[in-house]
Image: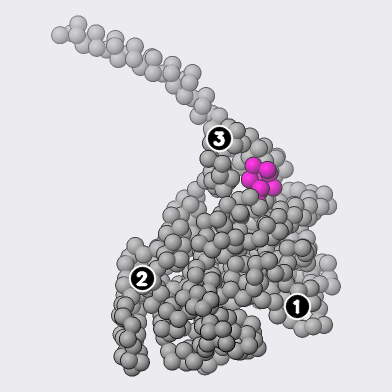
Amino acid sequence: MLFLRRDRLLWVLTLSALLGADIYFHLWPEIQVRLGRDWDCDCDNTASHVEEATTIAAMISPATMDYNGSKLQHLFSHHLYTAQPTKPPAHHLLLNAHETIRYHRKRIISFNRRRRSHHVEQNGTSQFINADFDFYTPWLQFHLGISKDALYPRSSPVVEQLLEKISNLTIIHADYSPDEKALNGECDCSPIVKPSGTHLKLVLRFQDFGKAMFKPMKQNREDETPEDFFYFVDFQRHNAEIAAFHLDRILDFRRVPPVSGRLINVTEDIFLAAGNSELQTVFFLSPADNVCFFSKCLYMCKTEYAVCGDPHIIEGSLSAYLPSLSYAPRHSVPNPWIRSYTFTGKEEWEMNPSYCDSVKHLHPYTNPRRLLNIIDMAIFDFLIGNMDRHHYEIFTKFGDDGLLLHLDNARGFGRHSQDELSILAPLYQCCMVKDDTWQRLNLLALPEYRLSDVMRESLSADPLPDVLTEPHLLALDRRLQRILEVVRQCAQTYGEEKVVLKNMRKFPR
């Protein structure tokens, strides 16, 4: 018996020696290589950090990795996009799941009751469809995933599911938007919206109780904004809303709610689904027998500015709604780089090159994180050509550390032939940019990823064809280079360690 035990011990020792040798000579060197790459990405030298990120990106080429020709998949597989943060703690999430579910169950009961009463009053002949509630519906999961850093996690399957629902699910209710209701005195929306001047939009509710902001097509994609137009009277472009969402996701900001294009039947999806009689009064037949409608706003929402179907079908954008203000309040903050909304006025930042120094001493911009988020927003707006960012919104719960919401982007992509450098004033006056933003901008300038190429591929997934024309796509590459040049000039003046910031707890000295 003792001999058998010694024999077994000998076999165990032999196998252990072989296993140890295999770990030491084969597995451990591979672990060191992988850990070494991760440590390189967290080094303190900003210049070498950026150079290392660019070098790694250049090494991962289509020749060495198979992505079936998809630059977008190639981009999202890069370590800058695959590095997953730890699951946010409960206090970093916007909503409590239990309270949110209870709130919506009550709202759906009330919503169905009001709609049924209106349907009976109007002697409706169409089939009445109740709104249903499901915990796993994409819009609810989208709301529950909102954190203080982003509207949705990276690679979230919920976003794709939500886009699919928005573009296909049955529309059961149509109503005015909050700012139009404010004009009618139906709600006190002043803390969050300012009355529209040129908007034409409606709120559409789906069968799963989700809702989206509908903006109809008002301008052909090939038409540029006329040179004599001021930014505050520019057209609202539905395709700009769609493209802005895709660009925001590519930049990994994740501050634009999901947006999808869709063909809408003006009669069935809006007129017959109207939630009040007043909305139905803005519909009429054109001389060509096309169904048209207009909306309520201060200046241009009259019959002569109506939009028409062909004869019933019109394309538009549908932007997923954020959680209701009643349980996820937001407040609107004036952009410190707000433009003058008169024909002759000038703002201080337009005349004072050192304007950023004074902004840094104002609350909440004494917190570098807030100011760097403003600079992110300026980079985003410069790429889409949006000059109309007079306010931004934040969730009240997160205070000064929360994300800035990039809402209402319909005035982007107006002129592909012009790069409005004044949009970048926060960047070139403050000469600061987040380290991760800088890395991604450099990555998108490489041929393997090229911003115009990944945008073209991303937009191809939208139900509407050719969301952006080719000149607008190519303009993204040109504008990206101008952003990189501004940062390089700042680095030459102040040193890269003071311009490209990793530590956002205080301003560099």
Is 450 above or below relative to 418? above
Q: Is residue 299 left or right of residue 129?
A: right
Q: Residue at x 72, y 76 (%)?
A: 231
Disc 3 to disc 1, how far (Cα)? 47 Å
Residues in magenta, as a range: 442-451
**As drawn, which residue projects farthest toward the top?**
3
Query: In the rendered structure, does residue 443 fall within the stretch colored magenta?
Result: yes
Residue named by callout 3:
65
Disc 3 to disc 2, how far (Cα)? 41 Å
Tag 1, which secondary structure? loop
Q: Residue at x 83, y 71 (%)?
A: 352
Q: Picture coordinates of residue 338 (x, y %)? A: 72, 75
Q: Looking at the image, do the residues carrying marks 3 and 1 touch, with CB atoms under 8 Å apart?
A: no
Q: Residue at x 40, y 63 (%)?
A: 138
Amino acid marked by disc 1: Phe
Tag 3, which secondary structure? loop
Magenta span: predominant SS is loop
Residue named by callout 1:
230
Work out whether residue 134 can be spotted: yes
The one of 101 and 457 positioned closer to us in this rendering: 457
Q: Picture coordinates of residue 407 (x, y %)? A: 58, 70
Lower sequence index among marks 3 and 1? 3
Tag 2, which secondary structure? loop
Disc 1 to disc 2, how far (Cα)? 40 Å
Residue named by callout 2:
208
Is 36 above or below relative to 318? above
Lower sequence index among marks 3 and 2? 3
The one of 113 and 214 positioned closer to us in this rendering: 214
Amino acid marked by disc 2: Asp
Q: Residue at x 57, y 87 (%)?
A: 287
